[in-house]
Image: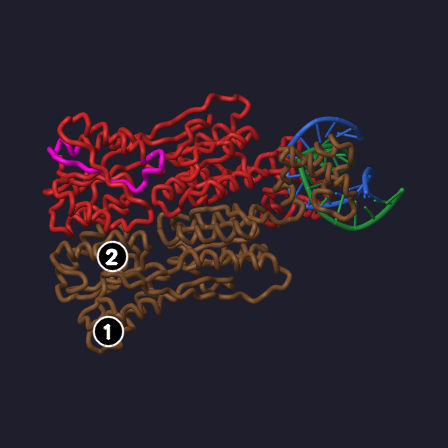
Chain colours: A red, B brown, C green, D blue
Amino acid sequence: MVTLKQLAKELNVSISTVSKALNNSEEIGEETVRRVKELAELYNYKPNKVALSLKQNKTKTIGVIIPNILNHFLAKVLFGIEREATKLGYNIITCISNESLEKEKESLQILANGSVDGFILAVAQETQMKNEIDHFKKAITQGLPIVMFDRVAHDVMCDKVIVDDFDATYNATKGLLAENRKQIAFVSSIEDLSVGKLRERGYIKAILETQKQDPVLLKIKSKDDHQKKIKSFLRKNKNVDGIISADSSSGIIAINAAVNLGKKVPRDISVIGFSSKSDAIHAFPKLTTIRQHAKAIGAEAAQMLIHRLQNMHLNEDVKTKIVKTSLVNNKSTKAK
Amino acid sequence: MVTLKQLAKELNVSISTVSKALNNSEEIGEETVRRVKELAELYNYKPNKVALSLKQNKTKTIGVIIPNILNHFLAKVLFGIEREATKLGYNIITCISNESLEKEKESLQILANGSVDGFILAVAQETQMKNEIDHFKKAITQGLPIVMFDRVAHDVMCDKVIVDDFDATYNATKGLLAENRKQIAFVSSIEDLSVGKLRERGYIKAILETQKQDPVLLKIKSKDDHQKKIKSFLRKNKNVDGIISADSSSGIIAINAAVNLGKKVPRDISVIGFSSKSDAIHAFPKLTTIRQHAKAIGAEAAQMLIHRLQNMHLNEDVKTKIVKTSLVNNKSTKAK
DNA sequence: ATGAAAGCGCTAACAC
DNA sequence: GTGTTAGCGCTTTCAT
């Protein structure tokens, strides 16, 4: 990499002259500016990011901590974060906590050594289960703002971007009730997560309001064989004619399992699930989907963090943004 | 963040004494070392990463450029890279090229400003189609080594980690032939990619060797409705009793479509596809899968790059590592 | 209009 | 055993 020093030497001017010329300072003569810029162009000069960061005490880099990059939703949020951050002139350093509290702490620690200006993260499963939040608070105290998305720690004072999970399943359940479904079941492999609990409650509320059916829950552990669990559940509960799925694959598996058992979807059973467009087509018929607008969530989180970084002096109150889900009617429910 | 300066002041010693003490230099007295370390501990001192980078002219950071984070395979490689890099003391800055040549160039450019020590990347689709490679060469010339994985540019002299795509489909096709399948078709939505072409050739070779059937190809464009395309293909080609899928979703869709058309899998038709474990269960029966060992590819790429970074002076020859795929027999083929 | 110098936080060669 | 100094690349204040 070419440095200001080298340019200065070659042009027989001082380093500061070169710096000013490149930064369009009024102080420098027209002719000099031209010569400097020409040479800089020729050598493809780029200001050294590290030196800038040191000087200005900010890195224009965001630390992103994702629990699980193989989760389509989380990956899509990351996509949204990256795009928005890039647009606003920031880079992202990505760490994957792998749902582990320890790894999450570590990542936060390591990046708090001056590598980043702030964090965007979704809380790891283990962290949510143990309800630990000190590491978050510590980072914030150190002057590194955090934006949490989707899975948040409510007791940490920081900006948040969340989904209206409760409403989403409440409304989805209402939708199946409107189809006159007699026994709607709830299938979840994420009951440990804050969002999993919210989704469950939304479903339960809608069911209890009917006063005509009771909640039926199928909870799947990650080590279970999802296909078998769901298939045997459907076999044993022949009266189930509607399914709300809380995670991204149970809905798809449920459809395929139902078809496999000789049921017609949606004639005999309707299914609604959280899912992405690309996964929804893995089911025949295509899964009616609760869309979470993952990219928008990521973009929103990036905006919030960068806004805060650029207005640190103002000390604004923390905000929570709720991104509304939307229901995409495909063929696994009766169309309206 | 606490600095050496502040510690030095509080302890009434010089900055360099503190620095040496913390770095376990032999020069410093036992007692001093103890005092320094205690205070550092108390204030949770962490060496400023940016200052270190500037001083040592290396960032211990790797730039990773991924074409599409929503692709499960690529996401998993990223996972592998992150894990291995972290283990070896490196951070990763992630950019997403979104399959665009322009974005890829930009990312390479921006990160070449001193932000990273080298790159790990898979070439964007557009880049492969236009066969542009100057931006890669430029980065390498600037002293930033590149490791390419999966989708590589053969004309760039750099380390590579690739999959034995040709062999994978060749062998998979042979496997279906051994089941005595009379007409095996090849379904692909990635014919533009280098790996897509290799997979196609592997299939074609195996078919031509039989001298009993001709290759039958279904090529899907990304804007097509994949479900419809595959379903109507199966309807029109009733003699097809075997399918090799080149991408990660066609195989799953094919199984579900076949079942939907009243066929029994694998009695009437066998299917093999590239896929991950978590996607394979979206099909009933579960898809027999060509596993690419994405995490291993990522780890290997990280190791290669870091090895090179730590031995830049040696100027070692570039290497290409081939990671063998393996076939996981599930229920969409006749078990051996 | 141009340059010298200080300083961001750190390490290390070189005094003492 | 401890301190001084220079320097990584850059911006910026303050001379000239």
Q: Which residue is mark 2?
A: B286
Circle nearer the viewer, 2 or 1:
2
**Relative to the observer, which residue lies in front, B101 or B92?**
B92
The chain letter under disc 2 is B
Task: Say which element carries label 1.
Answer: helix
The number of numbered badges drawn on the structure is: 2
Left or right? Give the position of A110 relative to A287.
Answer: right
Considering the image in quadrants, where does the C terminus of chain A appear?
top left
Q: Which residue is mark 1?
A: B178
Marks 2 and 1, how far apart at CA: 20 Å
Q: Which amino acid does the dot numbered 1 rest on?
A: Ala
Task: Say which element carries label 2.
Answer: loop
Q: Does B283 sit above or below residue A304? A: below
Residue A25 shows in this picture: yes
Residue drawn where x is 19% and y is 48% of the image: A232
Taking the magenta stretch, the answer to whether it contains residue A280 is no
Residue B190 shows in this picture: no
The chain letter under disc 1 is B
**Relative to the observer, which residue lies in front, B335 or B9?**
B335
Region rendered in magenta? A175-196
Taking the magenta stretch, the answer to whether it contains residue A183 is yes
Q: Which amino acid does the dot numbered 2 rest on?
A: Lys
Picture coordinates of residue B330, whole percent (x, y): 26, 61
Q: Residues within 10 Å of mark 1 (few under 14, many from 20)?
A: few
Residue drawn where x is 36% and y is 48% of the image: B70
Q: Does B61 sit above or below residue A24? A: below
- The quarter of the picture where residue B333 lies is bottom left
Q: Does A310 sit above or below residue B198? A: above
- First reached walking from the N terminus: tag 2 or tag 1: 1
Residue drawn where x is 34% and y is 45% of the image: A72
Picture coordinates of residue C13, whole percent (x, y): 79, 51
**Relative to the observer, which residue lies in front, C13 or B255?**
B255
